Amino acid sequence: MLDEREEEKKKAAGEYEKAFANTWKTFSGFTYDFEDKNTFDDTPEEREKFYHQLLNVKGGFNFWLGNYKDSLYSQEANEEAYKFWRKNVLKRIPDSKKAALLAPEYPVHPWGTRRSSLEQNFYEVISMPHIDIIDINENPIEEVTATGIRTKLGHVEADVLILATGFDAVTGSLAQLDIRGTDGQTIAQHWKNGVKSLENGFQDWIVSQRKVNGTAHNEPSQEKQETVQSVAVEA
């Protein structure tokens, strides 16, 4: 927790305003940005030191959005970052079967192209002996019974099922609104073949933080930017 006197000093010096102003200039809306060089501009030793600083010292999203500038654009660079991430994670997963699922040798998608987790002790918790993992890609759920779940591996007893399959949180609420465009279509009809921007028939409806925007960003700072830009457009 920041010391109250230290916080007052930062406020008086305008550090928070400076930090927020900087978020308008970065890729993700955070106060930091990609390193202005490519992965293989550094030696292996320099890369190792740089990766360690991002992942283990700075933490947060630094390894994702403060990495080398080609880490999300070059397959080779991405693989280099993943190898370092995996090497660190494997130290935290003593069980080889769990490790193969949670940090596979070959990633199922390029690292950082899906939402990264801000976990702190996930791998330590999942490594507890009373916790098991079943890969439903290999062993699909066949049936939910009165007492648990049946897969190819057999029946798993369960007192509680938590359905973490994703939620229709972005487009769902909008599609329920009976707002119609200039062509008479509802939003749900407009999106029946997939989500797309609302320009066609909804030119004057501006909705921030929705639809087809990216997710590799700091939402509070982007929300303000979109609001300011929307007001400018309306004006």
Image (spheres, rainbow, N blue to C red):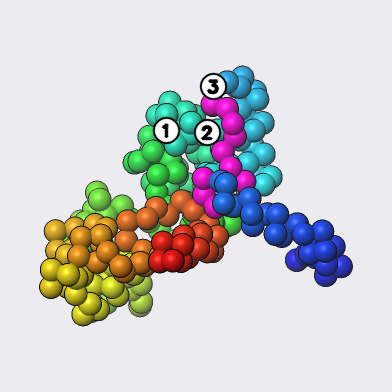
Q: Position of residue 154 (x, y in %)?
A: 23, 61
Do callouts 1 and 2 mark residues in contact (Cβ within 8 Å)? yes
SS of the residue at dot 3?
Answer: helix
The range drawn in magenta is 27-40
Tell me: 144 left or right of 11: left
How far apart are labels 1 and 3 at the CA level?
Answer: 13 Å
Three-letter amino acid code at the position of disc 3: Phe
Crowdedness of circle 1 by 10 Å Cα count: few (<14), some, many (20+)?
Answer: few
SS of the residue at dot 2?
Answer: loop
Residue 32 is one of the magenta-drawn residues? yes
Q: Is residue 80 visible?
A: yes
Question: Which is more foreground, mark 1 or mark 3?
Answer: 1
Three-letter amino acid code at the position of disc 2: Lys
* Most foreground residue, 151 or 53: 53
Q: Is residue 50 above or below residue 12?
A: above
Which residue was labeled with disc 2? 69
How far apart are labels 1 and 2 at the CA level?
Answer: 8 Å
Which residue was labeled with disc 3? 40
Kindly identify the residue that appears in the image at 36 percent across and 77 percent down: 160
- Which mark sits nearer the N-terminus, 3 or 2? 3
Q: Position of residue 35 (x, y in %)?
A: 59, 34
User: Where the C terminus falls, by quadrant?
Assistant: bottom left
* Most foreground residue, 119 or 24: 24
Crowdedness of circle 3 by 10 Å Cα count: few (<14), some, many (20+)?
Answer: some
Q: Is residue 219 visible?
A: no
Quarter residue 188 falls in: bottom left
Which residue was labeled with disc 1? 73
Tell me: 60 left or right of 103: right
Residue 176 is one of the magenta-drawn residues? no
Three-letter amino acid code at the position of disc 1: Tyr
Quarter residue 78 falls in: top left
Q: Is residue 47 above or below residue 152?
A: above
